[in-house]
């Protein structure tokens, strides 16, 4: 199946790589010449990481024009910037440029798919394909169904993704943040609240996650863990703890204050914590080592399943 990937940025180029590596002819579209020009070098980096000798670039065509890119495709994956109005306009255009059976997928991180496809007439072929960064290492894709999406579109998309070595899961309701980002940001809300109320500083909080329950999260999900220890204990813990967890229903004031003060993270030398250039580099090095280990695991074929 010929596939179009819209947006050749951080996510789009790597999504295109994975699909082309699985044998699909891929049309990669981006209005920015600079983005398209960066693709061969970015592909070479992925190939090096995966030690992939496959000549993937030969199966990918580059396009500035949307109509050219989607000509003859069976699936379109949109990975343009996370701006609701831009995505809505793109999907309205894709709706008119493609036949009603062509599947239209958005890689939005948190915007509900129903909102992205508000202006689409043929809504049964629209769904979410939420890849994680970087897709060649983190293989999860959340395939998000709306009230209108057909079962056939979900099944076909999951089959294409699984065949490309990804790990698709079916998200049965179009909730903001889907599954992964809801969990991730629920944790961040409590983390920020703990720091804001003076329970600990940011570096201590991260240490607790990394050295504590985070150390086992890669092999033991939170519900598996509850089932393993017995749910009665989880119930006892929740009876005591739930009333005390943060329920701030907007972005936390501490986060807003930091952003407004220019304390935006490692690049600024200060975010939730203070960072010298050496400390920031140590964190990046730690993350790079982890990614290299994960890449080696992928090469040896080890992966998880839902
Ligand atoms: N970065 C992440 O970690 C991550 C993870 C999962 C999902 N996403 C989502 O993927 C999408 C893309 O994110 P990214 O990080 O690759 O962004 P990016 O800024 O790296 O890339 C976006 C690309 O889209 C191009 N673009 C701009 N206007 C366009 C248009 N009208 N049509 C087509 N292309 C256009 C830009 O030139 C750019 O190359 C967003 O919706 C984002 O939320 C990002």
Image: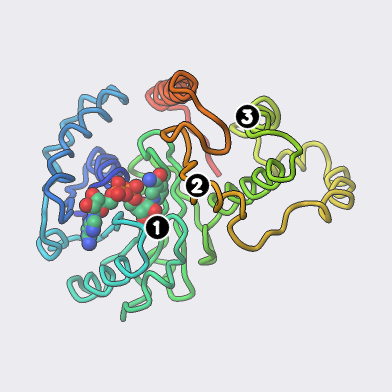
Residue assigned mark 3: 203
The numbered mark, 1 or 2, whose residue comes first in the sequence reads 1
Q: Quick one: SS at disc 2?
A: loop
Residue assigned mark 2: 261
Q: Residue at point 43% right, 26% down?
A: 291
- In the rendered view, does 181 fall on the left or right side of 298? right
Residue 160 in view here: no
Residue 146, percent across and down? 47, 70
Tell me the CA gap for discs 3 and 2.
20 Å
- In the rendered view, does 280 fall on the left or right side of 21? right
Q: Quick one: SS at disc 3?
A: helix
Residue 233, by quadrant, is: top right
Is residue 11 shown above or below 66? above
Residue 37, percent across and down? 12, 41
Asked whether 126 or 11 is in front, the reply is 11
Label 1 within 8 A of ligand 1 by Cβ: yes
Asked whether 101 or 93 is in front, the reply is 93
Is residue 143 shown above or below 303? below
- In the rendered view, does 152 fall on the left or right side of 191? left
Can you say which quadrant of the picture contains the C terminus?
top right
- In the rendered view, does 154 fall on the left or right side of 224? left
Residue 230, percent across and down? 83, 41
Q: Quick one: SS at disc 1?
A: loop
Tell me the CA gap for discs 3 and 1.
30 Å
Residue 108, by quadrant, is: bottom left
Whether pointer 3 and pointer 2 mark residues with C-beta atoms closer than 8 Å, the reply is no
The numbered mark, 3 or 2, whose residue comes first in the sequence reads 3
Residue 239 in view here: yes
Q: Label 1: few (<14), some or many (≥20) within 10 Å? A: many
> Residue 108, which numbered label?
1
């Amino acid at each position: 199946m010929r596939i179009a990937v819209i947006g050749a940025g951080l996510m789009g180029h790597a999504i295109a790589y994975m699909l082309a590596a699985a044998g699909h002819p891929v049309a990669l579209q981006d209005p920015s010449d600079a983005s398209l020009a960066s693709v061969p070098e970015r592909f070479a980096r992925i190939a090096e990481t995966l030690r992939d000798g496959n000549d993937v670039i030969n199966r990918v065509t580059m396009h500035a024009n949307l109509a050219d890119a989607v000509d003859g495709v069976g699936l379109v994956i949109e990975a343009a910037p996370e701006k609701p109005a831009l995505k809505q306009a793109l999907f309205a255009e894709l709706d008119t440029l493609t036949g009603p059976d062509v599947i239209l997928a958005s890689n939005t991180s948190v915007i509900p798919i129903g909102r992205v496809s508000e202006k689409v007439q043929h809504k049964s072929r629209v769904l979410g394909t939420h890849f994680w960064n970087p897709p060649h290492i983190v293989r999860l894709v959340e395939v998000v169904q709306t009230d209108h999406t057909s079962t056939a579109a979900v099944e076909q998309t999951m089959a294409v993704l699984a065949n490309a070595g990804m790990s698709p899961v079916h998200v049965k309701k179009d909730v903001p943040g889907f599954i992964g980002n809801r969990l991730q940001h629920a944790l961040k809300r409590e983390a920020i609240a703990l720091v804001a109320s003076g329970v600990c500083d940011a570096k201590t909080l991260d240490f607790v996650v990394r050295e504590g329950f985070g150390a086992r999260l890669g092999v033991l999900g939170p519900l598996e863990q509850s089932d393993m220890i017995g749910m009665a204990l989880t119930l006892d813990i929740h009876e005591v703890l739930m009333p005390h967890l943060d329920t701030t229903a907007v972005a936390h004031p501490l986060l807003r204050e930091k952003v407004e003060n220019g304390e935006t993270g490692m690049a600024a030398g200060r975010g939730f914590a203070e960072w010298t250039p050496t400390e920031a580099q140590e964190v990046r090095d730690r993350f790079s080592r982890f990614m290299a280990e994960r890449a080696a695991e992928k090469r040896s074929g080890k992966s998880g399943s839902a």
